[in-house]
Amino acid sequence: MKIGNFDMTEMLFHAQSAQSVLPTELGAGLVILIELACLIFLVLGAGTRITALLLIGLITVVDPTFQQSIDLAYYLMVLGLIALHGPGVLSIDNLAVRALERRFPNLEGMRGGSYEGMPRVVIVGGGFGGVAAAKAFHNASCRVTLIDQRNYCLFQPLLYQVATAGLSPADIAGPIRSLFRDQPNVRVLLGSVTDVDLRQREVVTGNGCVPYDYLVIAAGARHSYFGHDEWAPFAPGLKQIDDATRIRSRLLLAFEQAENAESAALRREMLTFVIVGGGPTGVELAGAIAELARHGLAHEFRQIDPSMARVILMQAGPRILPTFPESLSRRASEALTTLGVEVLTDSAVELIDGAGVVVAGQRVAARNVFWAAGVMASAAAKWLKAGADRAGRVKVVEDLSVPGLPEVFAIGDTALSNGWNGNPVPGLAPAAKQQGRYVAAVIKSRIAGGPPPAPFRYRHAGSLATIGRKAAVADFGRLRLSGALAWWVWGAVHILFLSGLRNRAVVALEWFWAYLTYHPSTRLITGEIPLPARPAAAQPTIPVPAPVAVDA
């Protein structure tokens, strides 16, 4: 057997030793028997996929001098069979599983899917918090049902990159079911929750009722137009993949229609992009649109110059990124200005229609307005008949349960928790994941009859926002970063947070390619998405005021 530079046949039956120890014919026969025995042994599964792939790599890469050897092809076929088929009954993997089953007899029943009589945990929502909670019940003595109205788990912080043609939807999302392939106590249901029957302890969905002993609400949030839902058709928000693909099509279609426009005034309107909201989503969306116009679409049009597109970021407050330190907000504003983005602070929007937006009585003519200003929690407070804040978040106690309903928990964007040193926990992915794992620990301790965990405390790891190519801000408390270093940190953190090795590798390669070429690879216009028609009696266009300077 040849592995790398070693030939086991020669090592065991070298010509000189064979002559001195065994007759030549007998030695050759034993070699054949040993090789056949090794083949049978390996095919039965005394090797694993990882081992087989490593050996293939060693044979084909480390020692390429054997590429013309018939022995090499023989062993590559055997190793390839192991890599494809996986370990068999004699593999170390299966031997370890059997040993564990003998040590813990209940594991065998759990692997077989027998969970009758065990406590029922229902999780509503397959986002960061819901998935983290479900994963934390691995090997727990309970049956978990995860309900979501979509079949995928989405990494929302990178939605803006799908909206601006930087990534495809499959790069930042993956099927929920695939996450629990090796967790047989978790059942995934596709459905939309409409209510919760607290008396019967059932979750009401469009497909029927799901009974529970413990309920975890992690239903996320939706767009909030602050009482002006009529703005939604003209200013789409960014919360789901469908939102991102619609914005992408609308964004790219604007350049295509500007190329066909007959008047300069119409081109200006089509190439004016207004982003309402100066939080991380608004800042990242504005920077990405500016880069797409100035670099990604360069030299591709003949009647228009995409770099002349106007990108305006409007913030009602005195500065963008209000949750960041003021120094980082100022640097973010400077970076956006360098990209060509007009940053308007103290600019509360009064009206949005098909002709643009009205701010402080003045109209900004724009055919493309995107909403990044506010969110509203799901209808969980209504389902539970529980107290909530103005954003609809359910007020919870120290263990994240709903007051008066100790078996019901709310986490993520659905919950209002003061577990951050007495302050509300922010609506960030790390916070939702921490809450999901904590609630799972509380439920498991109750099932086992053990003492409850200490009250929930959110551990803030930092805040990040990217502005564009090699520009970002990062707040880690005492450590504050901006510029290229913050941009690299932002990229590394977001890649690590993605689910699945495939998504991490693809996103890293896409970003590397875009970094080298400036050209995003997913500039697809999908579906029939006409731009909103101009109202019959549109207000006259008034030039936008000069950008308001951000205070130091």
Image (tube, rainbow, N blue to C red):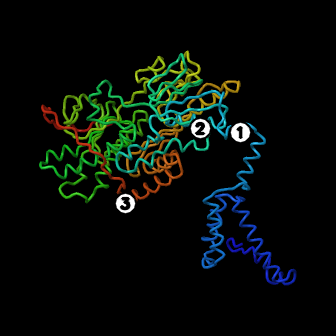
Q: Which mark is residue 135?
A: 2
Residue type, numbered disc 2:
Lys
Using the image as rendered, state which of residue 327 and residue 496 is in the foreground. Answer: 496
Q: CA distance from mark 3 to mark 1?
A: 52 Å
Residue type, numbered disc 1:
Leu
Q: Secondary structure at mark 2?
A: helix
Name the side, left or right, on which 434 lies relative to 311: right
Residue underneath mark 3 = 517
State the image coordinates of residue 436 (x, y, percent, origin top left). 56, 32
Q: Which mark is residue 334?
A: none
Name the side, left or right, on which 25 lies relative to 207: right
Q: Quadrant of the N terminus?
A: bottom right
Name the side, left or right, on which 551 lies relative to 98: left
Residue located at (15% from left, 36% from top):
541
Q: Residues within 10 Å of mark 1 (few under 14, many from 20)?
A: some
Q: Relative to 427, does residue 393 appear above or below in the rendering?
A: above
Q: Residues within 10 Å of mark 3 (few under 14, many from 20)?
A: few
Q: Nearer the viewer, mark 2 or mark 1?
A: 1
Decide which of tag 3 and tag 1 comes sooner along the chain: 1
Q: Nearer the viewer, mark 3 or mark 1?
A: 1
Decide which of tag 2 and tag 1 comes sooner along the chain: 1
Q: Residues within 10 Å of mark 2 (few under 14, many from 20)?
A: some
State the image coordinates of residue 530 (x, y, percent, origin top left). 23, 42
Q: Which mark is residue 107?
A: 1
User: Mark 2 and 1 residues: CB-CB less than 8 Å, in contact?
Assistant: no
State the image coordinates of residue 31 (x, y, percent, origin top left). 77, 75
Q: CA distance from mark 2 to mark 1?
A: 17 Å
State the image coordinates of residue 503 (x, y, percent, origin top left). 49, 50
Using the image as rendered, state which of residue 456 and residue 186 is in the foreground. Answer: 186
Where is residue 58, by image quadrant?
Answer: bottom right
Q: Secondary structure at mark 3?
A: helix
Decide which of tag 3 and tag 2 comes sooner along the chain: 2
